[in-house]
Image (cartoon, rainbow, N blue to C red):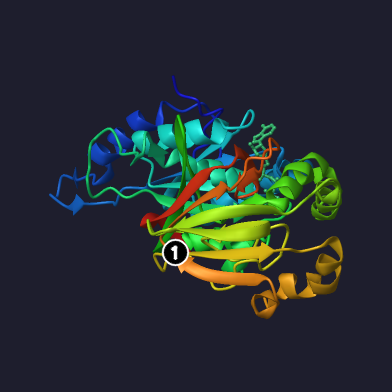
Amino acid sequence: MLRYSCCISNRSYAAKQPPLLLRAQHRVSSGRITLCTGGGVAVSSPRLRDLVFVVNPQGANGRTAKEWKKLLPYLRSRLGEDCNICESLTSGPSHAIDITREAIRDGADAVIAVGGDGTLHEVVNGFFWEGKPVGNLNGEASHSVALGLIPLGTGSDFARTFGWKNDPCEAVERIAKGIRSRVDVGVIDQEGRDSRYFINVADVHLSAKAGFYASKYKKFGNLCYVIGALQAFMGHDNRDMRIKVNGGEWETYPQVTALCVGNAKYFGGGMKITPNAVPGNGNLEVVVLQDFKWYDFILKLHKLYNGTHLSVNNVSSRSVQSIEVEEITESGCSIYVQSDGEHLGFLPRKFKVLPGAIDMIS
Ligand SMILES: Nc1ncnc2c1ncn2[C@@H]1O[C@H](COP(=O)(O)OP(=O)(O)OP(=O)(O)O)[C@@H](O)[C@H]1O
């Protein structure tokens, strides 16, 4: 069953369209239309690109829906000549994953997340199914679906690495230009469950707990991260952990406050936590904060925001392809894990990079 809530064509009316696959096939056959006129003149027109916009109406506490409504007429006028614009509003958590998988299978040229990092995270997860990239139903090996982003979330941290603002018109220009670059994706293996993919930052312990609480206060905008951090601090204690990097020996990391695995640089509403991470370099940057007390955050917060914290005592950084993280002595109290700001359960977990896994409109 097709789960697009509605499709809007590039023409000036809004109507329910046939399934994307059918439309795509129609265009493949009629796309390079050869019209033979009486005089034998052949006119060939190129195929329009199918762009599927996955919109989280609840993003940024409902601001995404309002911005999207304003943006749609501009989007149609800017891209409608070359593209079929298909809009799909999510109905709840995880819906964006299903929409994306279906759009890719149906032959979309690009799936564009409209919302915050959570929506982007779900769209990225929709690019995969049972550990493999989703392909289209025509089995076209060369068909590479692009990932796009119109950042309209609370934090929109992934966009910061590229210097993109929460400016939808700027994002539409990027989509119009259609320049693509390969970006890495992180994958988190979890015992007995499907792998989870991340494109921004995955993290463990205090920051993950803070993110968990922050998600309950999104109505306060970026202040939610401060409230989340304060709540996470209550009852927090640093824990001894062990890590295994690139399949090597286990190493002990005492008194870990937070461990962050960055494919990109920012999390928590603008904190430059993994400042050396580059989304296309085939590596993840791991930054570990150890033995931090609450006052360390007050004293060093500005360094965390501007990315100069790597020189601070008890902060270490390394570049990895994979990392396994466990608590040394299970205390009976679970250690939080999150990826791209979404709560993902508890330790132990293994994180690894999939180099150049997705083509991104950049
Ligand atoms: N229709 C919906 N109703 C309620 N929640 C939704 C809906 N669609 C998606 N979600 C959930 O909303 C959450 C947050 O979405 P999103 O990331 O777009 O906005 P945000 O949290 O404001 O931004 P950021 O993550 O950048 O801070 C996601 O976890 C997603 O699962």
Quadrant location of ligand 1? top right
Q: Residue furthest left?
A: 40
* Residue 9 pos. (x, y %): 49, 38
- In the displayed structure, 136 sits above or below 245; it is above
**What residue is at 74 percent from the left and 75 percent from the top?**
303
**Left or right: where does residue 315 sit relative to residue 356?**
right
**Left or right: where does residue 132 sit relative to residue 331?**
left
Q: Residue furthest front?
A: 329
- Within 8 Å: ligand 1 and the Cβ of disc 1? no
Question: Which residue does the numbered mark 1 point to in the structure image?
Answer: 320
* Other residues around mark 1 within 10 Å, as few (<14) / some (14–19) / many (≥20): some
* Residue 19 pos. (x, y %): 41, 27
**What residue is at 71 percent from the left and 57 percent from the top?**
268
Quarter of the figure with residue 336? top right
**Identity, as a three-letter code, of the amino acid under mark 1:** Val
Q: Is residue 169 visible?
A: yes
Instruction: Name the quarter where the N terminus is drawn.
Output: top left
Mark 1, secondary structure of its residue: strand
* Residue 61 pos. (x, y %): 78, 42
Quarter of the figure with residue 166? bottom right
**What residue is at 82 percent from the left and 50 percent from the top?**
224
Residue nearest the viewer, comparing 324 with 6: 324
**Left or right: where does residue 23 sit relative to residue 64?**
left
**What residue is at 81 percent from the left and 62 percent from the top?**
293
**Left or right: where does residue 34 sit relative to residue 285?**
left
